[in-house]
Image (cartoon, helix red, strand yellow):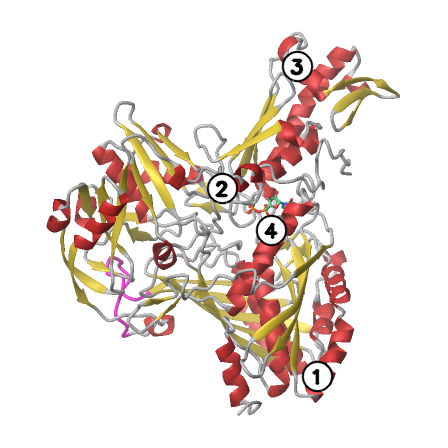
Amino acid sequence: MIHKTSPEVGGMGHPLRRKEDSRFIQGKGNYVDDVHLPGMVYGQMVRSPYAHARLKTVNTEKAKKLPGVLAIITGEDLAKANLAWMPTLSHDKQMVLATGKVLFQSQEVAFVIAEDRYTAADAAELVEVEYEELPVLVDPQKAMDPGAPVLREDREQKNNHIFHWEVGNRKATDDVFQKAPVKASVNAFFQRCHPAPLETCGCVADFNKATGKLTVYMTSQAPHAHRTVFALVGGIPEQNIRVISPDIGGGFGNKVPVYPGYVCAIVASLTLGVPVKWIETRSENLQSTGFARDYHMTAEIAADRDGKMQALRVKTLADHGAFNAAAQPTKFPAGLFSICTGSYDYPQAFCEVDGVYTNKAPGGIAYRCSFRVTEAAYLIERVVDVLALELKMDPAELRRKNFIPPDRFPYESSLGWTYDSGNYEAAMKLALDKIGYAELRKEQAEKRKKGELMGIGISSFTEIVGAGPAHTFDILGIKMFDSCEIRIHPTGKAITRMGTKSQGQGHETTYAQIVAQELGIPANDVTVEEGDTDTAPYGLGTYASRSTPTSGAATAIAARKIRDKAKKIAAYMLECSENDLEWEPGKFYVKGAPSKAKTIQEIAFAAYTNMPPGMEPGLEAVDYYDPPNLTFPFGTYACVVDIDKGTGEVKVRRFVAVDDCGNIINPMIVEGQIHGGLTEGLAIAFMQQIDYDESGNVQGGSFQDYLLPTAVETPHWETDKTCTPSPHHPFGAKGVGESPNVGSPAAFVNAVVDALSHLGVKHIDMPIAPWKVWNILKEKGVIS
Ligand code: CDP
């Protein structure tokens, strides 16, 4: 049972205002570009205008002569130090600066260092690079053709195929399909998109020649892992590297990989002995850093005539760009895409994915997504709607019929996951009741008679977040656990440090609330510090909604270790046995005599001034938490759209989001997370795509083409929740940060297709821009 703490203490469930916001709204945040060190100089990348070209010469002479230029690093220079290539997070390698040839537009070719940013930018334009253009591959299907030009000449394998990965029982699934009376299928492309965080990537590398210590201030979602990579790749002793992630203006997975800019800034600082700052421009961020999605997917469902699903078959071509730099755990080349059975009970399933190289920027990062889960949730929620059309069945009814029932948890999916807990029907019922589903269907029927276009979309997604457990999950061999250290000061105040790193999620508030819940120390008396590898315990960082399931759990366990010690001290102070003591948040008291009590603050003081004989002084604990399983948050999103026949514009009339992330630490923060993620989902569904023309030129490489939704485009979000605690998490919580981005694209697309389904429309690929809808209306003879 979770004790309810007072608002002053502010434990679990209190909508505490975000502590960090006080500095943010005053403009007093401390981001990487706010770091100014004495003697600091600036780096600027020279990038390739071509998507595929032989690099003939890189001439830096003219650029070097520009007053203020200090040095220029080329791929050849790095090759001499064996640093021209670096490992990626997916056991591939990636060029730091190009040698031999370039493989995507905007690839890093040289790094100019100058006394100021403007001189560095001017000098970068003076670097003369001679290219010889090569044939470009932007279509992953064509890249798989046997005669296709081989992009990666460095590999032994002489084709563009990266990996084949499959899971499930192919034969048993095929057998079901052979006999099934009803089949439905969809080819869905989840377009390449980009997290586009408000703050781009950057760093300040500061090598101190006197101490031999390298400090890197950087936009890192995983500071410890980056420190270890720098040590392993650069050969610098790990104790001499300190990574500091200051405030981060949004990450969404974009700040997980190691980028060439970081490496070049470090090399430059090691060489010149001065701090070197490198900050990307917006276009550099969109064009060269970790993209997301780019999955060409086919899903088929085999079902009975009454709509009971029997099997799911999924085939996917994954476009990974020039280097396989996808951020994902080692054992899962397609991430956790095998969650694609979703919220449904499939007796059989089979899923296969092929990864392929093309002339595009590398990435495949987990953009607000637990490693390809967004693609999986979108696919299953789309194909279920296609089956409903095939069966002429209501999509809500079809879902209800096939949901994994609450009494089947923990549930073993046919693709190998053990879902911890769920109650899908309850979430769907709440969402449909709130939106008035039955009434809307009646309204739709009336509107159709009048030739008006209105659609209702449902998405009942299941998520999988919180990697580890360590026995299955690692990144570059480092096991996926996470950590927390708590120190209670003599006056009963505390400082806690974690292996995770907030990028705007509000960790300084919510972790403090966990301590408040477990120890009764007011959340405002608890300082939360993340992102400094010299002080925080080792951890794998924040992405894939893993902070609450891992470091959140570690915080509770570390607090409970402290409480155990506090109990001993309280027993000594109250001259009673530990067994006679009861706990309520904030104090121990003697059973049956509540006035005989010691508060946590009194106990903390005693831990330094009056500890029991033989007891080690102090009151602190650390916990490295290896979760026994992932957590499986879920929800149902329901959306109503109206379509303007004249322009093809889709207007989102209403959007109801019911989420279930188990027990909630801070309902206001969770609601904020959901608003943000839904807005990103809206953008993906209707506005955003990083596309390429035939020559590999990036379309969508600036905010002129890659559209961000403003308040004008964003509808009013209506949120609600159900609560199905995780049975294995110390306080029953599940992650939530990515749910809205994972669950919403299908709700939007399902609504648009629903509006047009009577015209024979089965699927429309995102982004659903007005011109696409307008063309369909024209093609179907709705408008002339
Ligand atoms: O890893 P990340 O912080 O991005 O994701 P998360 O663990 O889902 O947490 C996002 C924010 O929501 C954090 O501030 C969490 O503490 C908060 N949260 C919560 O208050 N209750 C939950 N059950 C889950 C998350």
Mark 4 residue's CB less than 8 Å from ligand 1: yes
The Cα atoms of the two marked residues, 4 and 2, are separated by 18 Å
Determine whether the residue tagged by mark 3 lies in a helix, strand or loop: helix
Q: Is residue 148 magenta?
A: yes
Residue at mark 4 to residue at mark 3: CA–CA distance: 38 Å
Residue at x-position 25% and y-position 39%: 267
Q: Which residue is mark 1?
A: 447
Q: Which of 528/624 is in front?
A: 528
Amino acid type of disc 2? Gly
> Which residue type does callout 3 highlight?
Phe
Residue corresponding to mark 3: 605
Query: Closer to the observer: label 3 or label 1?
Result: 1
What is the secondary structure assignment of the residue under circle 1? helix
Q: Earlier in the sequence, mark 4 or mark 3?
A: 3
Image vertical order of residue 152 relative to residue 574, above or below = below
Query: In the displayed structure, would residue 556 be above or below residue 749?
Result: above
**Ligand 1 positioned in quadrant:** top right
Q: Please, is residue 172 above or below residue 195 in the view? A: below
Residue 234 x/y as whole percent: 29, 38
**Which range is magenta?**
147-160
Q: Nearer the viewer, mark 4 or mark 2?
A: 4
Residue 95: where, in percent of width, then height? 27, 52
Q: Which residue, given by chain and number where applicable, does mark 4 sit on?
A: 673
Instruction: Work out how far the residue at label 1 is from the one at label 4, CA to CA, in angstroms.
Output: 35 Å
Q: Identify the element where label 2 is drawn.
A: loop
